[in-house]
């Protein structure tokens, strides 16, 4: 079986059409794609321009619309056939896409175009594969919007400075465990950290975590942090599919090579690290 990214995505699309009333969760589709659950959804979204959930809903409702237009089958039965056990939830989802209820749609015989907005090409960024050692981190966990991880870094910075630990740090790192298009903003998990030697005792009030070593794709991004999503889109949607490599079951992370405290936004340098198999 080919493991090219095109083949994986086609396999997932075929699986969705063949199992409209089945389990089409993210985990189930990651298994079909034979890809790391850490990175599957980000890869899919970056390549296709929509989330897995949006694809599943679009396909389910397109098939439902076609059935409504060409058959006299009861609406409840069509809803069940495309994975909606509750008629009301089906009606709400259908109206959000087609602007009318399933019954009104059937009465009007509206055509059912199957169109998805074309994705704009991604900007290119330099990426290198590097074999890197494991990293030992000390830091603070953060839950919530990723841009507010700066709050955790501010508290961490005070602790590191107050205890005279800066000479023992090896750079600032942020680890991101969730995909913002899948996990609700209040539930997003991240970790604000400094890399330190493995034998440094974890200071009271902080947590220690380890990042695995091995091959990693390292994308170097220059510019303001607010534009980092475009770099992620390139890494996961363009570079990774053409690389012939698979992502590992480990979170991606950012290493900051300078700081906004003494660097203009356009000169900020960030490395995005993607662990590879």
Image (spheres, grey):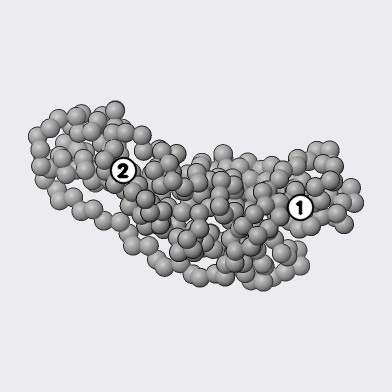
Q: Residue at x 25, y 36 (%)?
A: 82
Residue at far right of view:
164
Residue at far front of view:
1
**Element class at badge 2:** helix
- Looking at marks 2 and 1 on the same chain, the residue that comes earlier in the sequence is marked by 2
Image height of 213 relative to 240, above or below = above
Mark 2 or 1, which is nearer the eye? 2
Q: Residue at x 21, y 40 (%)?
A: 64
Bin the neighbour count of mark 2 within 10 Å (Cα to Cα): few under 14, some 14-19, many 20 and up.
some
Q: Where residue 167 sits: x, y (%)? A: 87, 57
The residue identified by callout 1 is: 195
Task: Give left or right: position of 242 versus 76.
Answer: right
Q: Residue at x 14, y 48 (%)?
A: 110
Q: Nearer the viewer, residue 88 or 159?
A: 159
Bin the neighbour count of mark 1 within 10 Å (Cα to Cα): few under 14, some 14-19, many 20 and up.
many
User: Does residue 1 appear in the picture of this structure?
Assistant: yes
Q: Nearer the viewer, residue 128 or 66?
A: 128
The residue identified by callout 2 is: 15
Q: Where residue 10 sits: x, y (%)? A: 33, 52
Image height of 198 relative to 77, above or below = below
Q: Residue at x 18, y 50 (%)?
A: 112
User: Does residue 149 appear in the picture of this structure?
Assistant: no
Q: Answer yes or no: do the residues labelled 2 and 1 have beta carbons within 8 Å?
A: no
Q: Where residue 160 sits: x, y (%)? A: 83, 50
Instruction: Determine which quarter of the picture holds residue 259.
Output: bottom right
Q: Nearer the viewer, residue 151 or 122?
A: 122
**Element class at badge 1:** strand
Q: Where residue 48 sits: x, y (%)? A: 38, 56
* Residue 175: mark in rendering: none
Distance between the Cα atoms at labels 2 and 1?
Answer: 42 Å
């Amino acid at each position: 079986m080919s493991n090219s990214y095109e083949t994986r995505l086609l396999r997932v699309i075929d699986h969705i059409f063949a199992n409209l009333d089945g389990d089409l969760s993210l985990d189930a589709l990651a298994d079909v794609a034979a890809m790391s659950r850490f990175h599957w959804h980000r890869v899919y979204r970056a390549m296709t321009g929509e989330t897995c959930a949006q694809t599943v809903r679009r396909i389910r409702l397109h098939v439902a619309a076609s059935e409504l237009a060409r058959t006299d089958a009861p609406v409840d039965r069509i809803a069940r056939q495309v994975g909606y056990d509750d008629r009301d939830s089906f009606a709400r989802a259908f109206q959000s896409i087609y602007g009318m209820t399933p019954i009104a749609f059937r009465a009007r015989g509206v055509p059912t175009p199957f169109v998805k907005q074309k994705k704009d090409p991604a900007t290119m960024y330099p990426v290198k594969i590097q074999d890197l050692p494991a990293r030992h981190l000390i830091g603070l966990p953060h839950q919530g919007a990723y841009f507010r991880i700066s709050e955790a870094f501010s508290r961490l910075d005070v602790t590191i400075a107050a205890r005279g630990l800066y000479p023992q740090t090896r750079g600032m790192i942020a680890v991101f465990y969730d995909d913002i298009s899948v996990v609700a903003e209040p539930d997003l998990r991240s970790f604000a950290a400094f890399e330190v030697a493995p034998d440094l005792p974890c200071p009271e009030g902080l947590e220690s975590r380890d990042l695995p070593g091995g091959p990693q794709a390292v994308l170097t991004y220059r510019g303001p942090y607010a534009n980092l999503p475009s770099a992620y889109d390139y890494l996961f949607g363009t570079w990774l599919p053409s690389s012939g490599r698979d992502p590992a079951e480990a979170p991606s992370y950012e290493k900051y090579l300078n700081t906004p405290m003494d660097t203009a936004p356009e000169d900020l340098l960030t490395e995005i690290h993607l662990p590879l198999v």
